Amino acid sequence: MVVFASCGAQWGSDLWVVGYVNLGVVIATAVAYVAVMHRKVLERLVRAPLAAHVNGTEFDKHELHALFSALDADGDEALTMEEVVAGLWRRHSGGGDGIPGKAEMLQKLVSQAGPVVNREQFKASHRLILAEMNLTLRAARKLTDAKPGGAVASAPSQETHHDRAKKVGPMSDEP
């Protein structure tokens, strides 16, 4: 305490400088952290756009720009539906061949979004494109999950906790 008392008025003004420097460091660190996290989210989006779409992610204009650039295989600033389907399938399956339901999906996409889309058209129709791709892949998955003998494997239960509670009945303390 004696040291602080002997510093006089100068100590108080030095303490404010240290406080402002610390505040600047904290703000700079937060900005850097947000920038790094946004870059990671952007990379995940470009790697797995269907997963992001299924999870309900709303894409901003920068994310759509990055996705468009990643899907534009020939770099001509226009995406054919063939490029879109092939690019999304490559990111979804890890590069596997044989897109299930490709002809029907291409026909639907061409009729709904057009045979070729530019950046602005892609931004306007990206939900439709991703939803159609997702629906086609889910339908194909159901067909491949069919049990021997023609029966289709049952889908995972969509039963909620509330539904299970109705079946079980009220809880009691009795064994």
Image (cartoon, rainbow, N blue to C red):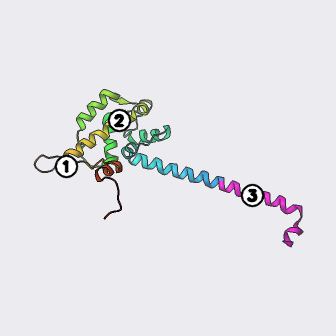
Crowding around mark 1 (Cα neighbors within 10 Å: few <14, some 14 to 19, many 20+) is few
Instruction: Provide the residue designation for mark 3.
Output: 19
Answer left or right for 38 relative to 92: right
Q: Kindly report the secondary structure that dominates the magenta region of the rendered protein.
A: helix
* Residue 48 x/y as whole percent: 38, 47
Q: Residue at x 34, y 42 (%)?
A: 88
Q: Is residue 66 above or below residue 125?
A: below
For badge 1, the amino acid type reads Ala
Q: Residue at x 38, y 30 (%)?
A: 117
For badge 3, the amino acid type reads Gly
Residue sitting farthest toward the left: 149
Answer left or right for 148 relative to 21: left
The magenta stretch is 1-26
For badge 2, the amino acid type reads Ile
Q: Is residue 28 above or below residue 85?
A: below
Task: State the residue in front, 53 or 157.
Answer: 157
SS label for mark 2: helix
Q: CA distance from mark 1 to mark 3?
A: 64 Å
Q: Earlier in the sequence, mark 1 or mark 2?
A: 2
SS label for mark 3: helix
Location of the C terminus (image quadrant):
bottom left
Answer left or right for 156 relative to 79: left
Q: Residue at x 17, y 46 (%)?
A: 152
Do residues under tags 1 and 3 come within 8 Å of each other at their CB atoms?
no
Disc number at residue 153?
1
